[in-house]
Image (cartoon, rainbow, N blue to C red):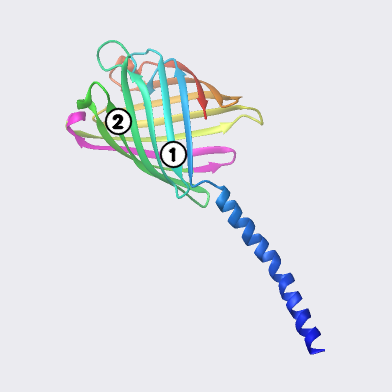
Amino acid sequence: MKTITIRCAAMLAATLTLPGLAQADEAEAEAEATPAFDISGEVGLLTDYRFRGLSLSDKSPEATASLSIEHQSGLYGSAWASNVELGSGKADDLEVDWTVGFSKDVGRVNLDVGGTYYTYLDSKDLNYFELYGAVGTAVGQAEVKVGVAYAPVQDSIGGEDNTYIYVAGEVPLGDGPVSLHGTFGIEDGAFGDSKKDWALGLSVDLGSGLTGSVDYVDTAHALTTAGDPTVVASLKFGF
């Protein structure tokens, strides 16, 4: 009788243990199946290169390409390239922006901090560095983000610093592929004196990685015709 009792107890323990072991194995398998790094990229065509409301392509078309790599810890890095006009009258110079940052979800809030080094292939004396931070969250169906970018004093930006504060948001329109998005920013320092810029537009998911958008872009106190109001259309392919 004692032997039978021991065997029953062992069988019961095994029965209780097996589901836990199965769940542990499944969790381990999922962890192994999830890659530590995620690599993505995008290419795009735009009718104008607008950066914080100002045209950096002399109101000429823009072609862009980017590549990003993100670790599951939240660390990420990216390189973004575009043609740019640097005073020659032609938007045939090359800008490459190098970014390193860290993004983390804390409850319903996303925290994002990092730095970007803006480089210009044929005008290295214009290269400059900028730090940034942003907080994003969901408000109903909308995604809202508030952020700040700060460029410390550097010779390449006239020996001044620069601060840019902005709010951005995006919300889907119904259950379809169209969404509404907008931004508003205030800039002060090397690149502006209480300059304001804003954009409002529509994006549509065309499927297969393609996204099209149309935006109205405008500025106030830009002190240059590069900030004149315009409509920018774009077509981008992400992979």
Q: In this view, does 48 lie to the left or right of 195?
A: right
From what the image shows, is residue 198 above or below residue 101?
above
Q: Give the range drawn in magenta.
A: 137-158
Residue in view at x 73 percent, y 78 percent: 10
Which amino acid, mark 2?
Tyr
Can residue 54 be seen from the camera position used here? no
Tell me if residue 226 comes above or below residue 153 in the rendering. above
Main SS type for the magenta part? strand
Is residue 218 part of the magenta span, yes or no? Answer: no
The residue under label 1 is which amino acid type? Ile
Q: Is mark 2 on a helix, strand or loop?
A: strand
The residue sitting at 38% across, 12% down in the picture is: 60
Number of labels in the image equals: 2
Q: Which mark is residue 22?
A: none
Please indicate whether residue 210 sits to the left or right of residue 131 in the image: right
Quarter of the N terminus within the rendering: bottom right
Q: Is mark 1 on a helix, strand or loop?
A: strand
Asked if residue 75 lies left or right of residue 18, the reply is left
Q: Name the residue under label 2.
A: 118
